[in-house]
Image (cartoon, coloured by chain):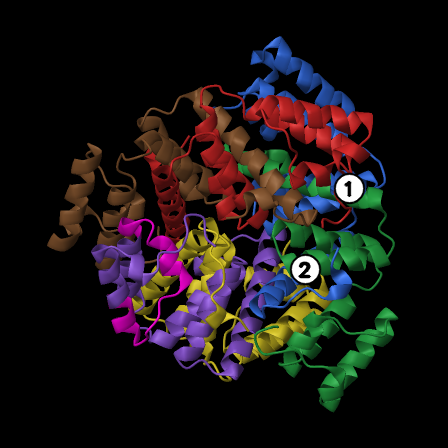
Chain colours: A brown, B red, C yellow, D purple, E blue, F green
Amino acid sequence: MATLGLIEYADASPEVRAVYDDIMDTRKTDWINNFWKALANDPATLRRTWEDIKQIMAPGALDVLTKELLYLAVSVTNQCGYCIASHTASAKKKGMTDDQFRELMAVVGMANETNRLSAGYQIEIDEQFKV
Amino acid sequence: MATLGLIEYADASPEVRAVYDDIMDTRKTDWINNFWKALANDPATLRRTWEDIKQIMAPGALDVLTKELLYLAVSVTNQCGYCIASHTASAKKKGMTDDQFRELMAVVGMANETNRLSAGYQIEIDEQFKV
Amino acid sequence: MATLGLIEYADASPEVRAVYDDIMDTRKTDWINNFWKALANDPATLRRTWEDIKQIMAPGALDVLTKELLYLAVSVTNQCGYCIASHTASAKKKGMTDDQFRELMAVVGMANETNRLSAGYQIEIDEQFKV
Amino acid sequence: MATLGLIEYADASPEVRAVYDDIMDTRKTDWINNFWKALANDPATLRRTWEDIKQIMAPGALDVLTKELLYLAVSVTNQCGYCIASHTASAKKKGMTDDQFRELMAVVGMANETNRLSAGYQIEIDEQFKV
Amino acid sequence: MATLGLIEYADASPEVRAVYDDIMDTRKTDWINNFWKALANDPATLRRTWEDIKQIMAPGALDVLTKELLYLAVSVTNQCGYCIASHTASAKKKGMTDDQFRELMAVVGMANETNRLSAGYQIEIDEQFKV
Amino acid sequence: MATLGLIEYADASPEVRAVYDDIMDTRKTDWINNFWKALANDPATLRRTWEDIKQIMAPGALDVLTKELLYLAVSVTNQCGYCIASHTASAKKKGMTDDQFRELMAVVGMANETNRLSAGYQIEIDEQFKV
């Protein structure tokens, strides 16, 4: 059940509870998932990670759903089981339809394929692509 | 210059030229990048890969820019130099702004970080996330 | 239960037992974990892997705990579930404190993030860093 | 020369210069490497990344050299060319000897090997390792 | 049980059944594994993936067993649990002996090790290897 | 030119020369590539790595060409530039035809694609595949 255990709200320090409260408030939810309960064993990392995610995943030039889809694409590429499960759920909550999921998966699969074709054929970068 | 060399249009077989023509026609461009010129050494793979990409990257439940951003997110995660260069250029052509690129990079970096935190803390999947 | 099964001490050949004995003797332990029991299906690989690890993980310019932390950092980056579990246990046995584990995880997460920022921004190597 | 170019000190905004100054001050150096010059195109990410790294890489339960070695181990595992070059230089500056580098490389190589043996043999986690 | 559920033959559309029939016919088997039942939620991807695999895995310059071994080597390198299980079974069905499996694993482990030694030592490509 | 430089035969210690001689003798070649020249900075690792490779890559239940193809498949999956270049050359020397290379690349690309489809759809392992 996680290397250092999971810190439940009832057992959390005021510092950890403050982060939990902000997570629930920001996400309009009434529970905390295991990721945060595990990170709570390291309050500095809990706070830093949450502050970073809150800043990065806020709507900006990219909308929140697009950001969540990108998060899922990375998690699938890295074969991270927990991340795939949690970000699939999160993307659905933010409006991802089944059709969007299907297309996301097709793109991620294709990109992983052509990434290897590019490397394996030892293809040099075209002048037109150089920055 | 690529393991089996690059096949220029002038030297291409009719089968390869047909794919090149379709690429240029579909993408409204007048040149072929090194990826396709390298794959042309294997006409079956050239055709299959192009047909797959044409199908997958067409607008659908996800728009073409979102798909291109996902492609770039995967390529960055895999550290594929050629793919990062070509898909950054491609995303810009499809309308990616500098601000969108900046946010994309921040999300991809963050996801790669939390993917490892999840794995390293040996976090179990919450019941709420199970499918 | 592992592709080719697990070879218990009682069922092991003299060649495999010799390696098991050396593992238990070197590590001051009285049991063999599943990794070795699985590799025992290939005695040549069992012996080679054990001899390599014994040589590489011995104290040298880096102490044994530092080496174990590095092993864990790699395993987390690769999302290897078995390896994370076994090397977390091994690092604890060699003296890793909870605080050290927390800091290790933070570094591994951060490195995985900036690895992608470096690749995604297509950053060239500074002259000062070239070997 | 990096996707959005490199921001030199002379051309940087006060916000970016403040981060550059803190980097040079903290690291006792008089120059800024390309990683920060590229991130400066996104001042929010520049600041966030620097603040995170400053916090994470500070001496704590693990000393600064050990943290740098871990950073390098991750970068090598991910095949990140820029990161390997910059963190090898950084580790040397923090005191990594050639012998320590040699042993680091041996451990990283070995861990990447056994990570695949564990996965490929489909080895289950021992009860003793379960958290 | 898979993100969008598993589509059993009895519940499948004629389009999906046609692919299932072709899979069972081509592979001389009377059941469909979970991979295809999950992909069936996206009939276009199901058909495209199956047609691609049928073309790619057919005997050619490489025999079917060699292709299956390569598939397994990639899956082990990527730490893909499902893929390792399914392609180990598939390779056995195509004739992989236990000795071949043992040697495959040894090669995959070794390659993953030297891949990191090459990157970590920042080794430049020999003139003799340049294409 | 490699982190610790490259050790030429003329400058090598007797211990290193003995390994170089065995490499050239075993491989029927009159030169040493940069990989070994870099590893020679760590004679223990040079010897261990060479002995391991000599044992693992020798003909056995799998022939030497198949082993070399597997090595290349792993290197491509890991995006290791040096390894792709050197093992493509090595595979050609051992008899890999252009057609075999083409098919290898197609299989490696496909496997990398379906590895992500399997993970992304969160597919459970079929009972039939369980060991």
Asked which secondary structure carries label 1, the reply is helix
Q: Amino acid at mark 1?
A: Arg
Asked which secondary structure carries label 2, the reply is helix
Residue F56 as seen in the image, left or right of residue D38? right
Magenta extent: D22-45
- Asked whether residue B69 appears in the rendered view, the answer is yes
The chain that hosts pointer 1 is F
Which mark, residue F83? 2
Placement of the C terminus of chain C among the 4 image quadrants: bottom right
Residue F49 as seen in the image, left or right of residue F92? left
| Depth check, front residue: B120 or A97 | A97
Q: Looking at the image, which residue is at 72% across and 84% down? A: F16
The residue under label 1 is F102
The chain that hosts pointer 2 is F
| Depth check, front residue: D49 or A29 | D49
* C61 shown above or below A12: below
Residue C64 as seen in the image, left or right of residue B34? left
Q: Counting other residues with Cα less than 10 Å from the Cα at mark 2, is it few (<14), some (14-19), or many (20 or more)?
A: many
Which mark, residue A77? none
Residue C103 as seen in the image, left or right of residue A126? left
